[in-house]
Image (tube, rainbow, N blue to C red):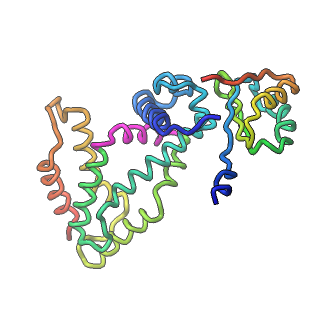
Amino acid sequence: MSACLSTMRTPYILVFKTNIATQADRSKVAPLLDQQPFIERWTVDMEDVDRVLRVVANEPATDNIIALVKASDYECAELED
Amino acid sequence: MRYRDENKVLAIRESAIDMVAKDGLENFGINRLAKAAGVSPATIYIYYKDKEDLLTSISIEEGLKMTRATLKGFDPKMSFKEGLWIQWQNRSAFALDNHKSAAFFEQLRNSTYKDKMMETISDEFRKNMGNYIENAVERGEINRMPLEVYWSVAFAPLYSLIKFHNEGQSLDGRKFKFSEKIMKETFDCVVKGLSK
């Protein structure tokens, strides 16, 4: 039973500062992010100055996500506390 | 990995209600909210995906809190007078304890969040209120009348008293403080007005 409990996973919520500012920008990043099996869902707050990318993932794959966004020619850095 | 911290969630919610109640929606933003709540913007994004998500989620929670408070101890089978008095007590207690939440709703009422807010007025609430009125009409306690007429007579007087109280003054700058006695006196006039 304890083994059962220990495998229950809560999702990781990862937030990043980006320059994804418009719908057009968003659609350029979308294909790569949508393809990743470890990403459950993601959103970009384009109203905010930091254009915050918020990813709900089942792995703490911060570096991975930064690499994916940068591969689409956009800036991406972890939004620090 | 960051864990959900209920104290932070509360601080975010309270500050958001405060800010919107005071300054409205126009200048409301995640960064300003973060400063007011004493958390980082990153923390707010852990819980909410954007400003809209945050305001929607808070208005749903506040709406549920309000309708639950209004129905406390209320039964649609009650006599008209008894049922109305319980609602006056519940509504005044909620409005006085949560005047910021009331001001928050007032700001949202004129915005695109209105629909979300209306959804929170649950079917249960509508059904209870509808049955209560229907029973009162059938028992011959009150006349059938349009909802607007009923609400304006049954509750608007109470909200006027609460408004006077929140402003600390009534007409011509007369000092005013809400009390159970004043509420009862107003209530008696309302019941007289609505009773057949």
The residue that appears at 65% across and 46% down in the rendered structure is A10
x and y percentages locating residue B25 in the rendered image: 50, 31
* A22 to the left or right of B185: right
- Which quadrant: the C terminus of chain B? bottom left
Q: Main secondary structure of the magenta part?
A: helix
Give the magenta range: B96-111
Q: Is residue B125 visible?
A: yes
In-front residue for pair B59/A8: A8
Judged from this view, the residue extending furthest toward the front is A2
Q: Residue B101 lies in magenta, yes or no?
A: yes
Q: Position of residue B165 (x, y in %)?
A: 22, 38
Is B49 left, or right, of A27 in this rendering?
Answer: left
Q: Is residue B156 magenta?
A: no
Residue drawn at point x = 85 percent, y = 31 percent: A28
Q: Give x and y (percent) for residue B169.
A: 19, 33
Would you say residue B27 is visible in this rendering?
A: no
